[in-house]
Image (cartoon, rainbow, N blue to C red):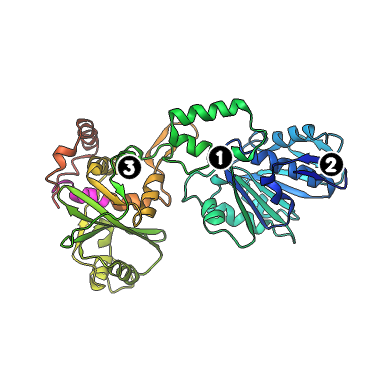
Amino acid sequence: MRFGSSSSVEATFSEAFEPLFHPARYKVFYGGRGSGKSWAVARALLVQAASRKLRILCTREFQSSIQESVHKLLSDQIAALGLSAQYQILQNTIRGLNGSEFIFEGVRSNVDKIKSMEGIDICWVEEADKVREASWSVLIPTVRKEGSEIWITFNPFLKTDSTWQRFVATPPPSAVVKKVSHRDNPWFPEELRAELEHLKEVDYDEYRHVWEGEFKAFTTGAVFGTQLKAAREEGRIRPHLPIPSSCEVHTTWDLGKSDATAIWFFCQVGPERRFIDYLEGRQLEIGDYAKLVKGRGHNLGRHYMPHDVDHDILGFGNRNRRRMFEDAGIKPITVVPRIRAIQEGIEIVRSQFSTYWFDSERCEEGLERLQAYRYEMSDRTLDFRPEPLHDASSHAADALRQQAQAFRAADPWQKDNLSERRIKAIDKWRSGHGDSASWMV
């Protein structure tokens, strides 16, 4: 596809990127490496800004210097398109002789500056998979000029990412959303094709993520990555997981206050813990959660809840949440004592994971949360921090941890399932934090 402007500027594009030249509030292009999406967007912006005066904001979640922006990409494309006479490339901005302007800012570190911006015609959000919901809530109202557009390019990372949920899973009605890959790039170089084929051969999951734009199988620093991978390979994550008719279904909870409450439903079948359902909610009343749990249609047994269920709530007649749950019909409740170190709880979950089975359909959201649960990397040392990142994925992991801690001491199969390495890891944590594992359920 060739595009020509009133300024006699011409450029060639893949047919996949034709929507860049038709009006739409949101233009979303996502997919794998080598699709040419950033290259196409840069060219389209330069061609359009050469034909009419535009104010263009080029942004991303993090940008500590101009080198981390698309400034160089645009500069290279100005030369490639023969537009050097129409643009002035400055250190921190690019200006057109017709008054067009390219601005480069990171959202996270320049919130107030972005909020105050006026007259943005087009906003290009690059590497948009990293953009938080809080950043979108700042950015979108900023681009408010009549007829303004937001162009979004990214490689998908996790299904739970804000950008995926906002623009692909449930896109706005005014959005053009298109997945692109190396197959849409007629200029895909043979050097990259060789890299693609090599990765496909040595690490197929990574190939699907990098080149096909599929979700990351396991994020870097995944807390339960090894355990989830083993469960999938061993067939312990499967649809329509059977439940014996006489089996009681227990629940294990992470109680949210201003954030999410997560609930796993599981039953014990011999040495197996079969997780057959998952529920997550935000800022609901206790009675609402009770109705949701009882409404799932399971033969409910015991409910395992963290220690803070016993905390009194002011204004409710000195009643605590445990009493309120019991009054709503969620009983009997077992309160799981608090442990001193979250890492000890993680090791307990890992030690029991070989007994876990999951219904892949009814537990889909919970499994996605576990997959995304990860250790955060320190920007200063580039090492992982000692505790996992607390985000939307934490609640499902914490709820699972309540089950593992509650069943640890009473588990007749636990000794056989604990590897020598896991036993040493738990003993190490106990020696440093006291024997908080000496209680019995």
* Residue at image point 52% right, 36% down: 210
Of the numbered discs in the image, which one, if any, rests on residue 9? Answer: 2
Q: Is 216 placed left or right of 87 in the picture? A: left
| Above/below status of 292 relative to 334 | below
Q: Main secondary structure of the magenta part?
A: helix
> Does 103 appear in magenta?
no
Give neighbour class at mark 1: few <14, some 14-19, many 20+ (Cα, 10 Å): many
Which quadrant of the rendered structure holds the N terminus?
Answer: top right
Query: Label 1's element?
Result: loop
| Above/below status of 257 relative to 360 | below
- The spot of residue 239 in percent (x, y) is 32, 53
Instruction: Tell me the CA gap for discs 2 and 1.
Output: 29 Å
> Does 405 appear in magenta?
yes
* Residue at image point 27% right, 71% down: 318
Q: Quadrant of residue 138?
A: bottom right
Q: Is 102 placed left or right of 399 in the picture? A: right
* Residue at image point 87% right, 46% down: 98
Q: Which residues are magenta?
A: 402-410
Residue 25 visible in the current orientation: yes
* Residue contact at pointers 2 and 1, CB within 8 angstroms: no
| Above/below status of 85 relative to 106 | above
Q: Amino acid at mark 2?
A: Val
26 or 65, which is in the foreground? 26
Q: Amino acid at mark 3?
A: Arg
Count of numbered circles in the view: 3
Of the numbered discs in the image, which one, if any, rests on residue 232? Answer: 3
Give neighbour class at mark 3: few <14, some 14-19, many 20+ (Cα, 10 Å): some
Q: Which residue is mark 1?
A: 32
- The spot of residue 422 in percent (x, y) is 23, 34
Query: Label 3's element?
Result: helix
- The spot of residue 376 in percent (x, y) is 43, 39
